[in-house]
Image (cartoon, helix red, strand yellow):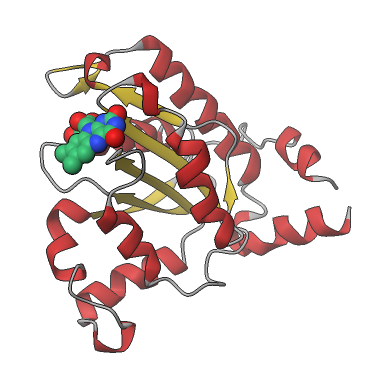
Amino acid sequence: MSFAQIFRTADATVPVAAAPALKVVVVSGSLQPPSKTRALLDRVVGQLATQRNIETTVIDLAEVGSTIATVTNRKTISPEIEALYGAVEEADLLIVGSPIYKGSYSGLFKHFFDLIAPTALSGVPVVLVGTGGSDRHALALEHQFRPLFGFFNAITLPTTVYAIESDFAAGTLTSTAVEDRVTRVVGEVLAVTPAALHRDRRASLRLAATA
Ligand SMILES: Cc1cc2nc3c(=O)[nH]c(=O)nc-3n(C[C@H](O)[C@H](O)[C@H](O)COP(=O)(O)O)c2cc1C
């Protein structure tokens, strides 16, 4: 079965309650609450939750970033923070987002992933989310975020979700264009995480590799 076929064999018909829970980990790279990035990530999770039984862990760097900032070695990390890294490395799906800072993800977002083992995300589907001050930096998701997860051999999903200030009202997403992209990427998540496969996420990679 090819990667393209995996995309076509979406198992969206499995009832939400019947499918085993998909372990979803959200990483938000904003340093300041309230965060538009976090609001957008929550929107993706919210829409996915209507279609799939998920178990979500949220790692918000606005909350834990100052602790992580000083760590350079996983061996010296506190058990609480190590548990967050463990959750990322055991995830069936990552939904990651950052504000655009100087044309890229925040420095703390990169530092968080610097401490992930190089092979730990191989074959893991990743949804890429970003917010910026203008549309001019929307493609940072393609030329900054996507290569970072390419390093890990993760499977970044084709549709990225990017929003700017005017796409929100009182902290809530109001743009139908952005909402459409959320819908599209949720469809891609359902396609690459069929209920029968997601317990062994690398099974989908093996299928792709042997096609
Ligand atoms: C230090 C800093 C650098 C920024 N650099 C950019 C940039 O290069 N391009 C851009 O579009 N927006 C830039 N912005 C704006 C933020 O990306 C934007 O306000 C974002 O939505 C904030 O997300 P948050 O609410 O999740 O923190 C920058 C903001 C800060 C604070």
- Asked whether the viewer can see residue 36, the reply is no
x and y percent of residue 172 in the render?
A: 20, 22
Residue occupying image coordinates x 72% and y 58%: 205
Q: Is residue 133 left or right of residue 92?
A: left
Q: Residue furthest bottom?
A: 75
Residue 48, compared with residue 55, is above or below; it is: above
* Rendered position, 67 above or below 59: below
Residue 182 screen position, x and y as percent: 44, 26
Answer with left or right where residue 183 lies relative to residue 76: right
Q: Give above or below for 174 relative to 17.
A: above
Residue 131 vertical position relative to residue 170 in the rendered view, above or below: below
Ligand 1 quadrant in view? top left
Residue depicted at x 33% and y 12%: 175
Residue 137 shows in this picture: yes
Depth order, front residue of 45/132: 132
In the depicted view, which residue is nearer to us: 20 or 199?
A: 199
In the rendered image, the residue lying farthest to the top is 176
Question: Which residue appears farthest toward the front when viewing the image?
Answer: 102
Q: Residue at x 74, y 37 (%)?
A: 9
Q: x, y percentage for residue 96? A: 39, 47
Q: Position of residue 150 (x, y in %)?
A: 58, 55
Q: Quadrant of residue 68?
A: bottom left
